[in-house]
Structure formats: C-alpha cells, structure tokens
Amino acid sequence: MILSQISYLDCIVFLIFLVPQLLIQVGLIRTATWVLGALPSLTLQVFVLPFQFIRERYFTPYEHRSAFVQRATPFQDFVIRCVRYAFAFMPASLGRVFFSKGVSLPFLRFRMLRHGIVTSPLRWNEINRPDLKGIWITHNKQEQPDIIVYYCHGGGFAMGSGFFYMEFLLAWVNLLKEAGYRNPALFALEYTLVPDAVYPTQLQETLAGYEYVLSIARNHTRICVGGDSAGATLMLSFLLYMTDHPELRHQRPGLAVMISPWVTIISKNNRNTQSDFLNATSLELYGRQYIGPKVPSDDPLVSPGNCKDIKKWTAASPEKGWFFLYGSEEVLGPETRALISLLKKAGTNVDHYEQPGGIHAWPVASLYLGETRDARLHGLRDIVQTIRSRI
C-alpha cells in the first residue's frame, strides 16, 4: 500500500485529529499555558516564516540558497521550515502527541479512505506484553516469514511511535514483496519515551524485541535490523551489547540499515546547518534526558559513537554488513561519517548513501513529502535493493 504525497487537505485533517488529543493527553491547562506563553513567538512566525520562505525561494540567487532549498519543492520547503521551528521551540510533552497513536492511526485511515482503500492489503496487529510493545506487520499470518525487518523509530527518545511511521513501514513491506520475498514481515518496537523512563530501559526493550523476532525467524541471518535517528542509536547500542553476551553473540542479524543515526548523543560535532530541521541545542537536551543522571554520557552503550574499539565493532557488525543513509546537510552528519570510516577500518561490509543537499531522515520524510512516486520511494527502494542483494 503506497499512497500519494501529503496534501494541504491532509495537513488540515491532521490538525483536526491533533487538537482533541492534545486536550486528552496533555490537558487543557498545560496546552493553553504553552500556547499563551508562545503566542508572541507564534504570532511573529506567522509573518516571519512566509517572509523568509518568499525571500529565499524567489528573491535569493539560486547559488546562495541553502542546499536543501535548491532541491526542494515549495511544499517541501515550507513544511520543513515549520518543522524546524516546532523542533526548536515546542516542548516534547506537546510534540509527542503529534506522533502518537491517537493522532497517527486515524490520520492513516483518512489517507487510505481518500485513496479509496477501506481495508489495508497488509495486516498488522499490536503486540502488548509487560516487557514488550510493538506492531507486527505481515502479508500472511499463517505463513513463516522469509525476511523480517526489526525497526526502531526516531524522535529524540522523547517523541514518536510506530503508528506515525505506519505508512512508511507498510510501504517497506510492500516493496519487499515486490522484490521477490514470499512473505516479508516487519516488527516495529514501541519503546518507552523519556521522561517516562531513561536508559537502560529502552535498550532492554530493544533486546526484548529482538528476542521476540528471533522466536519467529527460523534463521537469525534472515533478520534485518534498522532504525532512524534515536531508533538507529538503540540498534547500534544493542549490537554493541550483543558482543558482551555469549548467548547473543552468535545470533547476530543478517543486516543493519541505519537511517540518519544519532551516533554520538553529546558531541561538539553535532552542529546546526542552514538546511536541517534539527536543532543541536534541543538534541542535546533530549539526549541528556535519555542518558539520565546515573550514566556517563561517554558510555558506548548509551552513546555508540564513543566506542572507538575496532575489534568491538567487528564483533558487533551483522553478518551481511551495514547500509547507512543520511543527508549531506545533517546536524548528525559528521558523527555518521566518522562511524562509517571506523567500520571500514574494521573491515566490515559497509555501504552508504549520502544524499546531496539531504536533511535528517529524508528517506522517511520523502515518502510523505515527495512530489512523485519515484521521489517518495527512492530511499526505500535503495534499502530494499540492498536487503535483497544480501539476504
């Protein structure tokens, strides 16, 4: 199931679903308090955002525009400007509602109905156990999967849910089927967000998720682990964790797909760029919340980029290697490049694609914002092609 580009109508409907959930999950008083406090800034942005958009897009010479604006459509450009403002100034307690099940699932249903789809051709069901929560997606529940993707969503550890990513995940499974797999499946982990819990809770949940996937897969090499942003961090931490546990060391997945990984939580190399919507200051705030007060920020299990041991990364690497996707304009780009260089020195099988002018997690965002079908599926097709060639 692959839907068309997000429309302005979709944006309006999304806000309609969002407002009641803000009142339910955050409360009228807290929501109103933030809105009233941010009202001067919000009012200013009503004028500033359109002014900046028009000035750079239509009155700035092409060569002086930011790298992202040079390649973006007007719709993509304006949406990313709004996201950039929200990421920098909106508290996570409100931001997490944007990505919650209560907003995302009805929105997906609306998107499906707008495309004439009443029932998804792919089936999903929620896994809800005391130590594990997630979403299982497959073509045929009665048949053994021949490939399983184990995915962790991003969101700075403070926001996000598998339901917000559902359209992306469904498209991924659909493309795997088109690529020739008989019954591809995907498990999306729902880990606990901060401040509800801090490290190592999320790492333990990632471990529980992998054990669940292992219980279904006939062969651990038929598993591809993946994640974007903070979700990729959890997967990197988990792979390092496996190296110190003999019972897991020989159960490594076949492949790892890292989309814009947050390699090093606290790093001077995580710097703002003209194009990216991430904000280094907000990132550090989220990162410190995740690390918590009891764990050193340079602990490799909480911040994988701090592991410089080549032998450790060799032992942690999946049997069929790695595939990294990230943008040239990312705040997190320098640390991603450093990890790729380290993995190459370790002699692991690592491929990567650095999208020129690209911003954070664009393979995910482009599925919603891409103007054409090819543009929306470009990143996913690269991922599926890599999986098919190795597993």
Image (tube, rainbow, N blue to C red):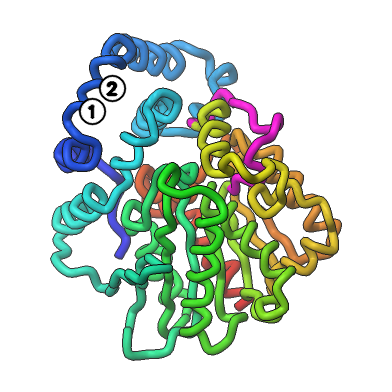
Residue drawn 27% across and 53% down? 101
Taking the image as shown, residue 137 lies to the left or right of residue 303, namely left
Residue that badge 2 annotates: 34
Assign the N terminus to one quadrant of the image: bottom left
Q: Please tell me in which quadrant of the rendered image residue 322 appears.
A: bottom right
Location of residue 254 with respect to 374 vertically, above or below: below
Amino acid type at mark 1: Thr
Q: Please tell me in which quadrant of the rendered image residue 63 appears.
A: top right
Question: How many other residues sit within 10 Å of disc 2, few (<14), some (14-19) or many (≥20)?
Answer: few
Q: Could you tell me residue 215's position as x and y percent?
A: 49, 84
Residue drawn 57% across and 28% down? 280
**Magenta region:** 261-277
Q: CA distance from mark 1 to mark 2?
A: 5 Å
Location of residue 195 with respect to 117 vertically, above or below: above
Question: How many other residues sit within 10 Å of disc 1, few (<14), some (14-19) or many (≥20)?
Answer: some
Residue drawn 49% across and 27% down? 69
Residue that badge 1 annotates: 31
1 and 2 marks in contact (CB < 8 Å): yes
Q: Nearer the viewer, residue 33 or 386?
A: 33
**Secondary structure of the residue carrying numbered label 2:** helix
